[in-house]
Amino acid sequence: MSPAPDECNRIRAAMDRILASHSEHSNGALTIVALALEAQVPRNALTQRHTGLKAEFYEQVRSRGGTPDSERRLRQQVRRLKEIRAADAKEITQLKADVEALVGALHQATVENSHLHQQLADWRAHGDGGRAADADDAMNAAVVEPAVSRTGPAAVTPRPRRDPR
């Protein structure tokens, strides 16, 4: 499809209307989409055929102290992503600390369990007069709570999942 003969003129007139805040066919946003709507041409007329006019439009927007809407949206998205990245880094640091505390608590519980098994084996080996069965029952019924500092797993609280948007 070949461009309309007056396409460049329509685009320049639309530029003037948008920059003067007198748009007739668009929302007046400082974007190529709004410029194409205002000029009543397809968007690819600006992105493929008339790239010079597109560059001229953005240059005029910047020279008047304005920032194109697309650039403003991108900057806002970059800010938001940087905030999310910082929050993620903080969460990763906390999770690493939690892992170390949990590994320590697991090690302590394993050592205590091994010690208790050794005590039971010693009791059985020394002929306790039938008390080994009672000791088995007592040990199975006992709840062994490892001594864990408040910075260990007891201090670990689940965090709600963050919305990825």
Image (cartoon, helix red, strand yellow):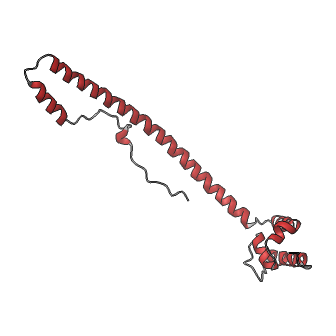
User: Residue 64 in the image: x percent, y percent?
Assistant: 82, 67
* Residue at 71%, 63% in the rendered image: 72
Which quadrant of the figure has residue 127?
top left
Is residue 8 toward the left or the right of residue 36 in the image? right
Please count the marks in the image. Answer: 0
Q: Which quadrant: the C terminus?
A: bottom right
Q: Which quadrant: the N terminus?
A: bottom right
Between 108 and 154, which is closer to the camera in this rendering?
A: 108
* Residue at 33%, 34% in the rendered image: 148
Which quadrant of the figure has residue 102?
top left
* Residue at 47%, 42% in the rendered image: 95
Which quadrant of the figure has residue 79?
bottom right
User: Residue 117 in the image: x percent, y percent?
Assistant: 24, 25
Image height of 49 relative to 16, above or below: above
As drawn, the residue found furthest toward the right would be: 5
User: Residue 150 in the image: x percent, y percent?
Assistant: 35, 38
Image height of 65 relative to 7, above or below: above
User: Residue 149 in the image: x percent, y percent?
Assistant: 34, 34
Can I make out residue 58 in this image? yes
Is residue 130 toward the left or the right of residue 43 in the image? left
Between 108 and 3, which is closer to the camera in this rendering?
A: 3
Image height of 124 relative to 57, above or below: above
As drawn, the residue found furthest toward the bottom would be: 24
As drawn, the residue found furthest toward the front would be: 1
Is residue 104 toward the left or the right of residue 118 in the image? right
Can I make out residue 30 in this image? no
As drawn, the residue found furthest toward the left would be: 129
Image height of 154 relative to 63, above or below: above
Is residue 97 toward the left or the right of residue 84 in the image? left
Between 130 and 59, which is closer to the camera in this rendering?
A: 130
